Every structure is written in structure tokens, then in C-alpha cells.
Amino acid sequence: MKDITIDYALRSSWQAIARMYNEEAKHFDSTMAVGFTLLSIDPKTGTPSTALGPKMGMEATSLSRILKNMETKGLIERRPNPDDGRGVLIHLTDFGREKRADSKDVVLRFNETVREHVTQGQLDGFFSVVGTINQLISEKKIYFKEKTSNT
């Protein structure tokens, strides 16, 4: 490809990051998905199971499998939501909090290393571009075509 497209650059970078995180997660007998889930659960109050999927941008079926695996490994426990009798809160166990700290250290190390190699201006520009892309998508300004009536 002569000119790299924006989506290609984003996708290939994310795939490289995911591979890197999964390689690192192996040292902790884990996966990137489990680490991301641990970081998405409030360590003090727990997180409603229904809020976890949208927070992580995951489908319920994929998240359900990850949570079941995490529960089996003793990383999380499900407790009734005191504010909603029908709901469930996902809480970290002591072991889950330890593994969450490991995940947090890995993410912080990645961020520190990147920050050592780019300027604050480059980083600000990156976040600005990503923010604009997300806004264009959420506002349906890329592939949305207004319907016209044939009356």
C-alpha cells in the first residue's frame, strides 16, 4: 500500500498492542481481555454486570465467557446489587485486586515508554485526532446519508 490509510494505521497499531499485551499477560497466567476486565471493575464498590460490557465496548456473550473464566480462577465474585434486586455487582476478590495491580503496572509501563519517545505536542495531536474520529462516528457523519422522500 503506497499511502497508509487512517483505519489501517489504527488497526495495525491496535493489533500490535494487543499482541504485546497478550505476550506480557502470559507471564501472569492471564490474557489481555482478563486484564482489561480487571481494570474496568471498580476495586472498591464493584461494577454492575450490565454496565461492564458497554464500559468495555464488548458484546455480552464475549464478556459473559470472560467473567465465567475469571470467577473460576477466583479473580471475581458476583454479589446481589443492593440498589437493584434484579442486578448483580461484579467484585474483585483479594486475588483479583492483586492481578488488577499487575495489569495496571503493565498499562502504566506502556504509557511511560510511549511518553518517553513522543513529545507532549505529538500526544496531544494524537488524542485530538482520535477524539475527532470517535466524534464523527458517534454523530454518524461518515456513512450516514440523509433519506430523501420521493413525493
Image: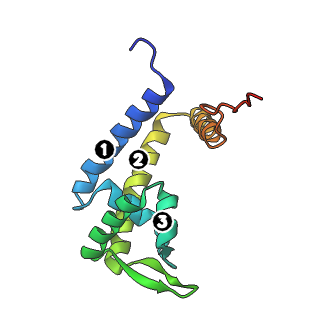
Q: Nearer the viewer, residue 123 or 141?
A: 141
Q: Where does the image place residue 82, in percent across and percent down from the top left?
A: 54, 88
Measure the alpha-carbon separation of dots 1 and 3.
24 Å
- Which tag is nearer the camera, tag 1 or tag 3? 3
Q: Residue furthest front?
A: 151
Write down the residue under mark 2: 110
Q: Secondary structure at mark 2?
A: helix
Q: Where does the image place residue 5, in percent across and percent down from the top left?
A: 48, 22
Write down the residue under mark 1: 20
Residue at the spot x=38%, y=67% of the render? 100
Q: Where does the image place residue 32, in percent across and percent down from the top left?
A: 33, 54
Q: Amino acid at mark 2?
A: Phe
Q: Amino acid at mark 1?
A: Met
Write down the residue under mark 3: 52
Name which of mark 3 and mark 2 comes first in the sequence: 3
* 10 Å crowding of disc 2: few (<14), some (14-19), many (20+): some
- Which tag is nearer the camera, tag 3 or tag 2? 3
Residues under numbered marks 1 and 2 in contact, where contact means CB atoms less than 8 Å apart? yes
Left or right, 1 with respect to 123, comes to left
Q: Where does the image place residue 76, in percent across and percent down from the top left?
A: 35, 76
Measure the alpha-carbon separation of dots 3 and 2.
24 Å
Among the 4 quarters of the image, the one containing residue 73 = bottom left
* 10 Å crowding of disc 1: few (<14), some (14-19), many (20+): few
Residues under numbered marks 1 and 3 in contact, where contact means CB atoms less than 8 Å apart? no
Left or right, 103 with respect to 3, comes to left
In the rendered image, the quadrant that contains the C terminus is top right
- Which tag is nearer the camera, tag 1 or tag 2? 1
In the displayed structure, 150 sits above or below 47; it is above
Among the 4 quarters of the image, the one containing residue 26 = bottom left
Residue at the spot x=26%, y=60% of the render? 30
Left or right, 62 with respect to 135, comes to left
Q: Nearer the viewer, residue 149 or 146?
A: 149
